[in-house]
Image (cartoon, rainbow, N blue to C red):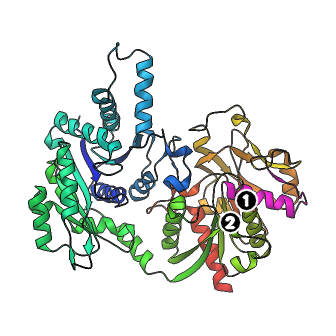
């Protein structure tokens, strides 16, 4: 069997330089050359996964088909590569230590002292190689979270060093992403932060093969030479990553910088053919040359942090490009919405999406917003809690049940239209215990959802504990709400619609998690279309 090659991506100087985007861009180029590629993320935090983290702490929690709650970078991997990731694509320090400690409790180490080296590093190496052992991938890109020099990252750097020694220089490659800042007072780019970052990596026994330099200004030949000389890499191995208009420009930028060629040469792999990027270029052209523009309100309670709704934002980019329409998102905190000001906040929008979330903070603002768009025939799209709020609003203002609520917020309501799932009632642990991952959904023929998907049987990803209470199904149907998507095994309501409304769709699942550049999600595409139609007839 052909050996799997490993590319490691590390970062220095500061976080948020874009290791995930560089990893995804490189993977897309290698994929375009005909290689089977996947990416995994090693996160140094002690949480087992980000599932219990507040979105303000870590941005959104991305969910895979197999139910893994993961880092949001896996969303970038899927959006760029148009392939699914899994539990094996995200590893955390918490997961590593949990496994090693469980092994120790079971006597697996035969009485030996359990230490960071070799036991923790051995487990990290085992996790890194898991994907390679499947035989599915020729190249695995491993992104190491945090920055070089962080105490929590040291075991990962050491595991990487050991793997390089064990597998051989021709089987592994290290890309180090660093910052080359521009000092306005001096009027020049400074390479010292990069030099110090590489020095830290060298102190850990790792010599990077390629340096990717994040910069606001073009690297001149002199700067490239200086970095190459003092960081001990070849001149052509200094790659410029200049700020771009959109993250989707980065693969083409890396193609021009020949990053994929560099990697294949160092791994002794054939170039095969030039990357097929025509569909990508077509997407970028439509993205940058829209024929229309619409205004969409994104109503949620984490709107101050864009990463909290990262997949939703990217889904609008994909759908907007598909419809040749610029989607101008207006982030509105649901806590600021009241019956008195809702018209002034939402009166000029072309559509509204109510975002997912947990807890009762800002819930009444979401309900007020939904009432306004429903009564004014403004296109509406609700996701997870957004769908549940639409049910509550309808129960209160159409069915007349003024106390209607979710038992998540009011356990004593006489009309619990949203209730705790039966399977969740005995669950006490928080992490990884929700209804997670992909589940089937059957669509009603002729419904808006059915017309959007173009098929009657779909599968979508979930992350929730509460569901529509089927005890009230007939009441809602008689009042004009339809249930156009249900789980075939449990009867769980997955999609609600109001047939007499131009576009009023709420979904229990998270469609944003399956939208990619190559396949924009059909519900987002249809929502953008409905909002554009409203804009054009105003």
Residue 272 visible (yes or no): no
Residue at screen point 32% across, 16% down: 112
Q: Secondary structure at mark 1?
A: helix
> Relative to 127, does residue 197 appear above or below in the rendering?
below
User: Is 188 left or right of 390, judged from the image as shown?
Assistant: left
Per the rendered image, the range of residues in magenta is: 385-406
Q: Is 112 covered by the magenta stretch?
A: no
Mark 1 neighbour density, 10 Å: few (under 14) some (14–19) many (20 or more): many
State yes or no: residue 389 in magenta. Answer: yes
Work out how far the residue at label 1 is from the one at label 2, CA to CA, in angstroms.
7 Å
Residue 245 percent coordinates (x, y): 38, 75
Give the image location of residue 509, x and y in percent.
63, 51
Front residue of 439/384: it is 384
Q: Which of these two is toward me, 351 or 330?
A: 330
Q: Is residue 177 above or below residue 528?
A: above
Q: Position of residue 38 (x, y in %)?
A: 35, 47
Determine which residue is flagged by label 2.
Answer: 334
How many labels, in total?
A: 2
Residue named by callout 1: 363
Residue at figure coordinates x 35%, y 38% from the top left = 131
The quarter of the rendered structure image containing the C terminus is: bottom right
Q: Is residue 181 visible?
A: yes
Mark 2 secondary-structure assignment: helix
Residue 457 or 75: which is nearer the viewer? 75
Contact? badges 1 and 2 (CB < 8 Å): yes
């Amino acid at each position: 069997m052909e050996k799997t090659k490993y590319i490691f991506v590390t970062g220095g100087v500061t976080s948020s330089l874009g290791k995930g985007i560089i990893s995804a861009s490189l993977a897309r180029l290698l994929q375009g050359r005909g290689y089977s590629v996947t990416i995994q993320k090693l996160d140094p935090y002690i949480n087992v996964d980000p599932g219990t983290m507040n979105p303000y702490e870590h941005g959104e929690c991305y969910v895979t088909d197999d139910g893994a709650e993961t880092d949001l970078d896996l969303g970038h991997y899927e959006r760029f590569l148009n392939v699914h990731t899994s539990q094996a694509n995200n590893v955390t320090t918490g997961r590593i230590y949990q496994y090693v400690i469980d092994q120790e409790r079971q006597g697996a180490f035969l009485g030996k002292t359990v230490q960071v080296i070799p036991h923790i590093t051995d487990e990290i190496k085992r996790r890194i190689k898991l994907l390679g052992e499947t035989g599915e991938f020729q190249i695995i890109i491993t992104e190491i979270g945090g920055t070089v020099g962080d105490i929590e990252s040291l075991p990962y750097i050491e595991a990487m060093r050991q793997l390089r020694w064990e597998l051989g220089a021709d089987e592994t490659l290290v890309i180090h992403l660093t910052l080359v800042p521009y000092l306005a007072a001096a009027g020049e780019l400074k390479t010292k932060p990069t030099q110090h970052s590489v020095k830290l990596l060298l102190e850990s026994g790792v010599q990077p093969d390629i340096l990717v330099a994040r910069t606001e200004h073009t690297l001149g030949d002199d700067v490239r030479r200086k970095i190459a000389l003092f960081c001990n890499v070849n001149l052509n191995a200094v790659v410029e990553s200049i700020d771009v208009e959109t993250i989707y420009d980065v693969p083409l930028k890396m193609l021009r910088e020949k990053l994929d060629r560099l990697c294949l040469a160092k791994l002794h792999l054939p170039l095969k053919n030039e990357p097929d990027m025509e569909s990508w270029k077509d997407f970028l052209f439509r993205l940058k040359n829209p024929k229309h523009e619409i205004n969409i309100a994104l109503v949620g309670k984490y709107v101050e942090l864009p990463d909290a709704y990262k997949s939703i934002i990217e889904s609008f980019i994909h759908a907007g490009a598909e419809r040749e329409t610029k989607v101008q998102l207006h982030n509105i905190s649901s806590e600021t919405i009241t019956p008195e000001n809702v018209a002034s906040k939402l009166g000029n929008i072309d559509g509204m999406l109510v975002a997912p979330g947990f807890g009762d903070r800002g819930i009444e603002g979401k309900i007020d917003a939904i009432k306004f768009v429903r009564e004014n025939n403004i296109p509406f799209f609700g996701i997870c809690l957004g769908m549940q709020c639409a049910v509550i609003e309808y129960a209160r203002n159409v069915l007349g049940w003024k106390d209607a609520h979710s038992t998540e917020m009011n356990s004593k309501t006489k009309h619990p239209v949203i209730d705790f799932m039966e399977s969740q009632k005995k669950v006490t642990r928080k992490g990884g215990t929700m209804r997670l991952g992909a589940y089937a959904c059957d669509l009603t023929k002729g419904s808006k959802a059915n017309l959007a998907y173009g098929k009657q049987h779909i599968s979508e990803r979930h992350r929730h504990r509460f569901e529509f209470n089927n005890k009230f199904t007939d009441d809602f149907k008689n009042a004009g709400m339809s249930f156009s998507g249900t789980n075939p095994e449990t009867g769980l309501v997955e999609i609600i619609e109001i047939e007499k409304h131009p576009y009023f769709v709420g979904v229990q699942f998270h469609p944003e998690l399956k939208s990619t550049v190559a396949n924009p999600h059909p519900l987002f595409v249809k929502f953008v279309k409905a909002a554009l139609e409203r804009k054009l007839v105003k």
